[in-house]
Amino acid sequence: MPGTIPHWIDGALRESTSGRTAPVTDPATGEVTGQVVLASVDEVDAAVAAATRAFPLWRDMSLAKRTTVLFAFRELLNARKGELAEIITAEHGKVLSDALGEVSRGQEVVEFACGVPHLVKGGFTENASTGVDVHSVRQPVGPVAVISPFNFPAMVPMWFFPIAIATGNTVVLKPSEKDPSAALWIAELWKQAGLPDGVFNVVQGDKVSVDRLLEHPDVKAVSFVGSTPIARYVYENGTRAGKRVQALGGAKNHMVVLPDADLDLAADAAINAGFGSAGERCMAISALVAVGGIGDDLVARIAERAATLRTGDGRRGCDMGPLVTREHRDRVSSYVDAGEAAGAKVVVDGREVRPDGAADGFWLGPTLLDNVSTDMSVYTDEIFGPVLSVLRVDTYEQALELVNGNEYGNGTAIFTNDGGAARRFQNEVEVGMIGINVPVPVPMAYYSFGGWKHSLFGDSHAHGTEGISFFTRGKVVTSRWLDPSHGGLDLGFPQNV
Ligand code: NAD
């Protein structure tokens, strides 16, 4: 009998009395493995109250003590990340090696956050005016909410909460209801690392929880990641309620291959970036733009490689796992049907996959569509599945126009041996993260992650120095210590002398 998956509030598991739950499935078997509770408004309020109570103590704890907890968390995570990877595979479906990779990329942000004393250092100016010194400090904003998507149940929350916690804030995490268990494992780990109760809380839930977090007066900032319509909704409602909001949305990432590129390297990259994690990555490549007559050759090389991929249960050493839910698999599959009906050529057909896994798993194999045009839904929509669409253009300018004409601007890549062309592309393309002969250019933790246009609402990207400034507020202090020469009365605007 599948058990319930509860909240984590004030340092302990907390059952729900809302009476609402949602099934959690193992995508490789199709079995319901748990029922995640869906919070009521009162339960969200309880989590925010815990975070609000914990805030003064945590804010005022020295950087030395805060970083001791962060280092302990990093050590525990590093030692036990295999457990977390197994939880991710069981609820998300991605293969174990990929789940481990996700945890490692999240761990990099924890390591970045361990350097918080350096990152929040302010400036100091002695004698800015005669006898007057000026210095700046950065202080935490208060309790913050992190609302995350299904596709990275560990890494995406870790883009935010290590930095939020390191800078002295307290956190309420609302994970995706599709894979909610990773968040609870992380909460237990924080407790073991010595984090005071109430600094990190997990509320399981759906729109009811999100809406309450957006309107709750004690929540001071919201970091959201998910699809573009919900990101826009969160940004508009959160900012209307006076909060600081960063809302990362959907994507449609193009990989441009110029005629001089190494086509084997490009074909490998297209496979890895198109089908890794079954295409359920916001940095996945879904549109491949072949420039200047290389289309047939490139498609043949990709098809040859796709035929070698093993789709199946992520615990069996396969290359690619199932999709997250049956509904999502059916939706992605229907895009392939629509593309075919609109005239695209199905070169590799994932609908016919024979998986190494249970019959009821949510399978769809790697799919390669050629001769896709910009009016087909398989191109216009974010599909979020293992479907690679090939578009053909004659020139670099046409490729650039295609990328810049898209509503999304998360990631893009160019494959070429021409440094000048690559340099021009990085300058002209309207996208936040760019790979040059690198297909999935996810920035390191000490840079910031984020897209342009409808891939991000708000001004701040995730982690790196932008993460530090998102979770802190600046103050500038101007001070003068009395000396024997008193300046006397002067009602004019302060001028520096
Ligand atoms: P989603 O938008 O369905 O859900 C994201 C979060 O919003 C979840 O916590 C969910 O419970 C909540 N939510 C869902 N419906 C809601 C509603 N009506 N009102 C309020 N909250 C709601 O996204 P998903 O399917 O979980 O994740 C995939 C999406 O996330 C893709 O679009 C992908 O591109 C995007 N994504 C973007 C990035 C990025 O960095 N830009 C990273 C990862 C994923």
Image (cartoon, rainbow, N blue to C red):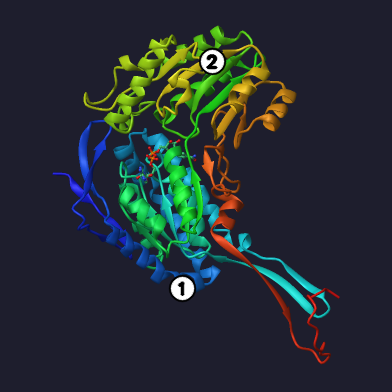
Q: Is residue 155 above or below residue 241?
A: above
Read off the residue under disc 2.
Answer: 391
Whether residue 98 is visible here, answered yes or no, is yes
244 horizontally vs 306: left or right: right
Read off the residue under disc 1.
Answer: 56
For label 2, the SS is strand
In which image quadrant can residue 397 be found? top right
Real-space Cα separation, disc 2 to disc 1, in angstroms: 55 Å
Please state the horizontal and vertical placement of residue 146, each as a whole percent of the image. 43, 52
Please state the horizontal and vertical placement of residue 401, each as a whole percent of the image. 63, 22
Residue 151 has which mark? none
For label 1, the SS is helix
The picture quadrant for ligand 1 comes to top left
Please state the horizontal and vertical placement of residue 184, each as a whole percent of the image. 32, 53
Q: Residue at x 63, y 61 (%)?
A: 118
Q: Is residue 58 above or below residue 298?
A: below
**Circle 2 or circle 1, nearest the eye:** 2
Which amino acid type is marked by label 1? Pro
Count of numbered marks: 2
Say if mark 2 contacts mark 1, CB within 8 Å.
Answer: no
Q: The N terminus is located in which quarter? A: top left
For this rendering, which residue is in front, 318 or 437? Answer: 437
Which amino acid type is marked by label 2? Leu
Q: Residue at x 36, y 48 (%)?
A: 175
